[in-house]
Every structure is written in C-alpha cells, then in structure tokens.
Image (tube, grey):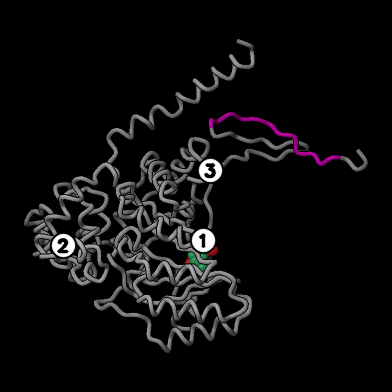
Amino acid sequence: MDEKQRISLNRAAELKETIAEYQHSLKGMPTGYGRWPEIQKNQEKMMKYFGATAAEWADWRWQLKNRIQTTEVLQEFLNLTPSEIEEIDRTGAHYRWAISPYYLSLMDPNDPGDPIRRQAVPQLFEYTDPYGESDPMGEAYTSPVPAITRRYPDRLIVNVTNQCAMYCRHCQRRRNIGEKDLATPREQIEEALRYIRDNKEIRDVLLTGGDGFMLSNKRIAWLLDELDSIPHVEIKRFGTRTPVTLPYRIDDELCDILSRHLPLYVNTHFNHPLEVTPAAREACLKLARAGVALGNQAVLLKGINNDPFVMRKLNQELLKIMVRPYYLFHPKRVKGTSHFYVRVEEGLEIMEKLRGFTSGLAIPTYLINAPHGYGKTPLLPTYLLGIGKDTVTIRTWENRVLRVDNREAEEGE
Ligand SMILES: *Cc1c(COP(=O)(O)O)cnc(C)c1O
C-alpha cells in the first residue's frame, strides 16, 4: 500500500466516526416509512368508523368533508384523558382546529408528545399564551391591495384563500384563519391581478393563503392562465401543505394543469421525518413528473424538530421524494404559539450539524423574519473568522481553523 492510500484509508475511518452517533440515533427515530404499518391500521379503523371505501379515503374532497373538528370524534382515534379533552375544547373555542383524516392517521394514538399530534391538536398554552403578537411580521402594513403582501422589489404574495386541510398549531397567519373557510373573493383576486399587471417589476408571483391548493382545479387553471397572460411574470409559485396533510389533493387533473404552466415551483411544509410517508412520496413524485420543482419550508419547533439528527433525517427523507430543502424558519413570535419557541442558538447548532455531515442538497437556509415586515434574514454559523490583508481565516465543518490566500493575481503575471 502506498503512502497516499494509507492516508486516504485513515481519513475514511475518521469520517466514518463522525457519522456513528447519527446512525445510532436513527434506531429510535420514528419515520413515516417505519410507522406505515401502524398508520395503515389507523386508516382502516377510520374508514370503518366513517363507513368509507378505499376510493373515498383517497379522494381529497371526501377527506376535506370529513375533517375531524370535535373532541367527540377525535377521542375515537386518540387516547385522550378527560383533562386533555377539556383542554382541547377550551382552546378550540378561541382558536379553530381541523385535522384531515389522513393527517390524523399518522399519529401515535397513545403518545401526547407525538410530533404529528403537537402540530395539529390544540393545547391549553395557545389560549393562555402571554407572549407574541397576532401579526408579528406586520403583514397588514405591507398590503397595497387587499389580497397582496409585498415586502420585496420583484415578487409578492397573493393570498388566494384562508383555507387549509389542517390548521397548524404554529400557524403564522392564524389571525386570518376565521371560523369559516373562505376563498378570496373574485373581485379581490382580479384587483390583485391588475396590481401585478400594472407593476412591471413583479416577475415572481407566489400563490398562497391559507393553502394555495385548496382552490379547485378550475380556479387554479384560471389563475395560472391569467398570470401567464402578463408578460413580465416569469415564474409562478404555490405555497401548500397538502403534500403533507392531504396528499390525495395532488390528483392527475391538477398535475396536468400545472404541467401546462411551467416554470412553476411548489413550496411545501414538512417538519418531521414522520410526515414523509408512501402517500406523501406519491404526491411529490406526481408533481415532479409534471415538471414542478419542489421545495420545503420547515419551521423550527420545540418538541417537534429542534434536534440536529431529526432535522438531518428530515432533509434526507425529503431528497428521496424529490423535495429540495429550501428554508428553515426560526419560529415567529405569533400569539398562541410560544410553547414552540426556541432560541437562535439552537437553530445555529442544527445548521452546524448539517453542513459537511450531509449533502449540500439537504441543507436549507436558516432564516429569521425581521420585525415590521422588513424581510427574511439568513442566520449562519460563523465560518469566516477573519479577513486579513492577504488572507482569510476560515473554520471548516470539523472545526479546523485554516488560512486561505485571498490575493488577486497581479496584472501581467
Ligand atoms: C417569503 C415571501 C416571499 C418569497 O420569498 P423568497 O425568499 O423569494 O422565497 C415573497 N413575498 C413575501 C411577502 C414573503 O413573505
């Protein structure tokens, strides 16, 4: 064996060691694929309760119609104590909740700390929360016409509906989630389209809400036709959590419509490896086959994914279903969500344990939202330690501190 190969083998052994702890952690970590047999059992039980066929179960309209919204039905599928039932009812009187049968089927019925359950089932803290504001990003002050939020020079959001398949307990726009599901009135959408038409610097339009895919296929086709008729709109994007909470929404007709309106990006919102199931995979692969580029916007949430290894696994699971991790949001100070807050140091630690340890493709940008709607602001562990006269000092993912030459080549050399 030559010297170079000996060094390479030593280095490989050293690298193997840096991943051992992660591999060990995977043994006890629940995932959507690992739990799938139990999830299927939960689904059978639910179909029996609702008297639904397998075809109905896989029909997104059936799923929406049969969303679970009372503790009376919820306790058929989760083991709830009387005090938990009271807690949900008390909170539910102030903050709406609704869970698609599919998303409920992902929960472990016996675990109050289940990461799926914590995202969907109300807790008393929401109602008693002394912290936060209803609109921490000041979206109400960045809305030039009713359905639009504009915080950037070349792109904006159109809020097309307030409806979602499931109302996340950590929702940043819970102020918009009223007692009723409301598609944005046609006149407001037309006003938004006029605004986009009149402002030629808008090249990127993000359709969200609520959930952009809660609109009917017909409405989506109309909206995309309208946007494609505006010459300066270069790309369209949807914000939707349906691949996670209602994967059956991604039907053939929708994919057909989307494929006729490329370039189109769909950003979704997976927060835990348990959400990456065979059903979610099918939905995402259908979108990918239609030519849609998929991204994920996760939110860092205490008790759900504030763990470097859970986050690493989540992002790796996403790549397997063609979803590219895009953003990791630091939790916003939204009233009713303080039980999910974590400190920035925790987010940085998670980022630190991604870079180098896994594919760059599996690494989202960690962001905090500036107050007053001043925009997404990236947060990064410090890798650039200093800039000297001729060199920069860097820190590698393994904490090696090294100097790199920073001079330009001299003219004529
Ligand atoms: C997040 C957001 C966008 C999109 O931002 P990107 O960084 O381009 O993904 C656009 N408009 C508003 C108001 C937003 O909050």
Question: Which quarter of the image is occupied by the C terminus?
Answer: top right
Which quarter of the image is occupied by the N terminus? Answer: top right
Q: Would residue 349 be visible to someone looking at this image?
A: yes
Circle 1 residue: 376
For label 2, the residue is 88
Residue 146 x %, y %: 44, 83
Residue stretch rendered in magenta on the structure = 398-409
User: What type is the residue that disc 2 sits on?
Assistant: Ile
Q: Decide which of tag 1 and tag 2 comes sooner along the chain.
A: 2
The spot of residue 154 in percent (x, y) is: 60, 71
Q: Earlier in the sequence, mark 3 or mark 1?
A: 3
Q: Which residue is mark 3?
A: 360
Dots 3, 1 in contact, CB < 8 A: no
Element at badge 3?
A: helix
Label 1: how many Cα within 10 Å (few below 14, some 14–19, many 20+): some
Choose between 269 and 366: the one closer to the eye.
269
Specify the amino acid type for callout 3: Gly
